[in-house]
Image: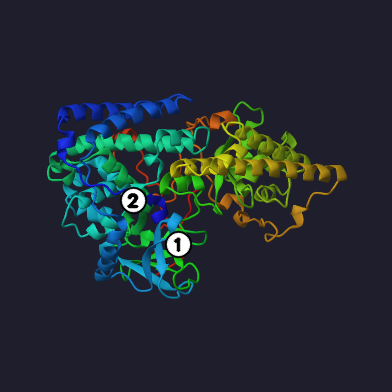
Amino acid sequence: MGKKSRVKTQKSGSSSANAAVTPKEMMSIISELLQKCSSAAPSAGKEWEEYVQIRTLVERIRKKQKGISIVFEGNREEYLSELMSWARESGASSDGFTVADFGSEGYGLQATRDIKAEELFLWIPRKMLMTVESAQNSVLGPLYNQDRILQAMDNVTLALHLLCERGDPASFWLPYIHSLPQEYDTPLYYQQEDVQLLLGTQAMQDVLSQYKNTARQYAYFYKLVQTHPSASKLPLKDSFTFDDYRWAVSSVMTRQNQIPTKDGSQVTLALIPLWDMCNHTNGLITTGYNLEDDRCECVALQDYKENEQIYIFYGTRSNSEFVIHNGFFFQDNAHDRVKIKLGVSKSERLYAMKAEVLARAGIPASCIFSLNGNEPPISAQLLAFLRVFCMTEEELKDHLLGEHAINKIFTLGNSEFPVSWENEIKLWMFLETRAALLLKTYKTTTEEDISMLEKPDLSLHARLAIQLRLAEKQILEKASANGRAKRLHFQEKLEEGAALPCYEESDIALLENTDADGKLPIILRKLEEVVEEEEEEGREIPAEEQNHLLNGDKLEEVNVEKTRTHTDVESALSIIGESKPKGQRETVTLSASRTEDPPKEKSD
């Protein structure tokens, strides 16, 4: 997993660098940071200003904490042989591959012999995994058992577990921790001018939220570690810097996965040593958890020759998710996409009828959809929504009360069965115009971005930001061009007087869309993302407002099943930040035997 990180060698500091800062002074700044991060969300257009204010406080803290973080001497490569030996002694597979440096992709697994597709080549026993369960049984356990907030935030528990073990010279996981990067390329590590390159992009709000949540969590847990009696023996007591927490959060964010608990009744977050060295490529999920042998197992995605790099598939993530949560941009991403938020206005005369047709198709009146970088450019869900959005009163009545109304509902997301030629023209014109309006919100052109990427002295983080910005625009340009082509196509159909396909005589096989996401009726498929009621449901969101929306309603690829927490805990969580893990890679399928069944994907 080397592409997501770079090593910066640094000697451990001493507390003398911080001698001028008293605990009271530090606690005062930390309290100020917590208060700032816990204040009400800024008004539209003020998010950047808030980010700069939070970052200024964080930099003050980092300056005062300089030199007291625990950083291992030497470089990452020196510890890789130790990792392999530890894995072998702990019962993991170690034949058939080694860890190697792949240049721009960083460290990854390299085949030392020919490996066949679907061959089981890698397994990691439970005892090697760092999990929420192992955290509960560690020095962190007493604090975990006392703090309800920590109990509700598995990803933070794992981050603090990692930090505590890093500070223990006798830790069982030290060979693994030694092999981790000392820095990452997530936006948490960007310079302010690099973050500024993302202004106007759809990814920007996620980047700002990530920084704010991390700063808020750090401030809360810093105060907890310094004041809670159960934290008195933690290695963090004397050294818990923002840089420490940023490192731990990034380590977890880029590596976390779900596995079943020991008894198989629930799932828990885990860090999976050695396996997490694999880099990403397009493909299918090939990792599962074998409950019988109590180990994580991975089969080869394809045939690999000796000395070739072994890849795995991280999941159907956009480049925005890769950049924000993994720290890299994947050039050939088959699943890249941008979000578009649409809704039927409650003030519209036909709102009730449109909402009812959408409801029968299993689609809310306000929703976040995706424009895809690859074919098909829009999903069946978005096609169905746009058809209803553009329906006339007569067309709506026909889908509610007309003959074969049920069949018409089932074919709303099928490109082979238009509602009418006029409806198709309107919906593709709408998409064409909407994508063009979104393009105008960017501060640079596609040509300017391409020119900037040609500069040889461009920093890695600036390059990632510009690549992401460019990718978003290219998807929108494609959507606009596709909308125009479709509009012209259906205008010709209308002018020719072409007959609409006769869906009444079709059987269920013909009701299936030819697109990959259209093999089931709309009502049976998961929505891309439902907008929360309080988020101005009932009106179409203007293009210029989309980039001001914070993404607090984003659904995660995997949600850890947890017991219901009390209201006070939920309230506190709203102050601390998100408890759902982000940036997860392959989700380990819960199974008693090895499996390649994919998990339920994130509905975005």
Q: Position of residue 463 (x, y in %)?
A: 49, 43
Pointer 2 or 1: first along the chain: 2
In the image, residue 155 sits, relative to residue 543, either above or below, namely: below
Residue furthest to the front in view is 456
In space, the residues marked 2 and 1 are separated at their CA atoms by 23 Å
Q: Where does residue 276 sit, x and y in percent of width and height?
A: 37, 59
Viewport quadrant of the N terminus:
bottom left
Question: Could you tell me which residue is drawn at 78 percent across and 53 percent down?
Answer: 502
Residue 126 position within the rendered picture, expressed as x and y whole percent measured from the top left: 28, 64
What is the crowding at mark 1: few (fewer than 14 residues within 10 Å), some, or many (at least 20)? many
Badge number at residue 201: none
Placement of 192 over or under 596, stated as above or below: above
Q: Nearer the viewer, residue 82 or 289?
A: 82
Residue at image position (60%, 46%) is: 381
Mark 2 or 1, closer to the camera: 2
Query: Residue tagged by mark 2?
Result: 7
Residue type at mark 2: give it.
Answer: Val
Badge 1 element: strand
- Label 2 secondary element: loop
Amino acid type of disc 1?
A: Ile
- Quadrant of the image occupied by residue 519: bottom right
Q: Quadrant of residue 555?
A: top left
Q: Is residue 428 left or right of residue 372?
A: right
- Please say which color scheme the image uses: rainbow
- The reply to whether callout 2 and callout 1 are in contact (CB within 8 Å) is no
Q: Front-most of 418 and 25?
A: 25
x%, y% of residue 210? 39, 38
**In this picture, is 434 found above or below 252?**
above
Q: How many marks?
A: 2
Mark 1, residue position: 312
Q: Is residue 413 visible?
A: yes
